[in-house]
Image (cartoon, grey):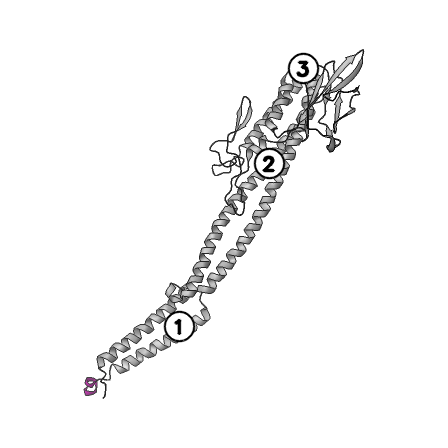
Amino acid sequence: MTMRVSNLSRYEGAIDTLQQRQIEMSRAQLQMTSGKRVHVPSDDPTAAARAERAFIAQQRITAEQRSVDVSRNAMALVESGLGQAGDLLQSARERLLEAGNGSYNVGERQALSTHLKQLRSQLLAVANQTDGAGGYIFGGQGSIAPPFQDAIGGVAFAGTGGQGQVSVSEQMPTSVDGEALWLNVRSGNGVFVTDAAATNTGSAYIAPGSVSDPSLLTGGSYDITFSVVGGVTTYTVNPVGTTGSYVSGGTVYVDGMALQVSGAPADGDQFTIVPAAPDLDPFEALDRAIAVLDDPASNDGLVAQAVSNGVRDMDAVMSHFQAARSVAGATLSRLDVIDSRNQDRDLWAKSVQSDAEDLDMVQAVSDFQNKQTSYQAALQSYSIVQRMSLFDYIK
């Protein structure tokens, strides 16, 4: 049995072939224009899935990099702010040492007190420094107003304690715990605090002291009381009951502590030694020194003690700030490592996406030329076939 193929069937088949060749050539042209081999999942489902996973990885890396940038900017501001605070504290320390000059009169000491007040104001401005985005770098976990409020009783923290973070896994801080940093410095020499009684009338003052034997420390409170009888000065250390003859600048050893009192104490003058605590802040330390320097009634002993205590406290706060600044610097170094790692991960993800969907241009040009030749051949073939009919023969 012979099957008859109509002219219409041949024409439709030829046209279908031409259309298919045209579609393939258009797709090849689109690929060369865009440089992409995969435009829709149907082009290559496996490669499309790989490219999608790589693209999602890039988006995650970009989001993490934004967090790195935010944290880096914040920590740079913290490090810079602590550097400024250290410079201000150093200036305050120098003014305090200057105030210890015994030849200065009341007016000169009050002029230095005015300078200390200005330094205190600048220090408060540094503590309330913003991050440029509406937050405060020393505001802890958040504060809608300046976190450090200056009141009659001193500076108080109005923020939320703790440290702001933009990532839990990588520990990327956006702020620091301002309360712990600025208001919880360990007082005295870090172990104990020495001070003079406000009622002292002599010119003696007590130095910060040091630890001579840690194993003998009791953590208790002591006082040294002086007695002047017939021109002879003695002291009694309570509650241990130790007594001795006083020598200016000499060292008194008490339960692992080395204490030095200098100057001329009056009869009944007293000095105290209490355990150190994390309750020192630079504003309170400056306020105490300013109060003594401003008071015309302050005797030489109170001035000398205020200078000694002030220098001791400035040193303690500067040491505390320097440690915090080192932590900020270490955080910046760690963020640089995370940044470098993100760049490597992003490069890897882009490489995977490129391998999955990018076009081999040399191969694509060759394929396009082949498709173009094939399409032209099909056109010529169709033009010949469509003339091979009975009517054409009769003509």
Q: Earlier in the sequence, mark 2 or mark 3?
A: 2
Query: Disc 3 vs disc 1: which is toward the camera?
Result: 3
Contact between labelled residues 1 and 2, with CB atoms less than 8 Å apart: no
Q: CA distance from mark 3 to mark 1?
A: 101 Å
Residue that mark 2 sits on: 82
| Amino acid type, residue under disc 1 in the picture | Phe
Q: CA distance from mark 2 to mark 3?
A: 37 Å
Q: Earlier in the sequence, mark 3 or mark 1?
A: 3
> Residue sitting at 47 percent across and 49 percent down?
63
Residue 318's quadrant in the figure?
top right
Residue that mark 1 sits on: 368
Q: Secondary structure at mark 2?
A: helix
Can residue 17 be seen here? The reply is yes
Frontmost residue, 7 versus 365: 7
Query: Disc 2 vs disc 3: which is toward the camera?
Result: 3
Residue that mark 3 sits on: 199
Quarter of the picture containing the N terminus is: bottom left
Q: Secondary structure at mark 1?
A: helix
| Amino acid type, residue under disc 2 in the picture | Leu
Residues shaded magenta: 387-395
Q: Earlier in the sequence, mark 2 or mark 1?
A: 2
Frontmost residue, 153 versus 389: 153
> Residue sitting at 19 percent across and 84 percent down?
391
Quarter of the picture containing the C terminus is: bottom left
- Which mark is drawn over residue 84? none
> Residue sitting at 40 percent across and 72 percent down?
368
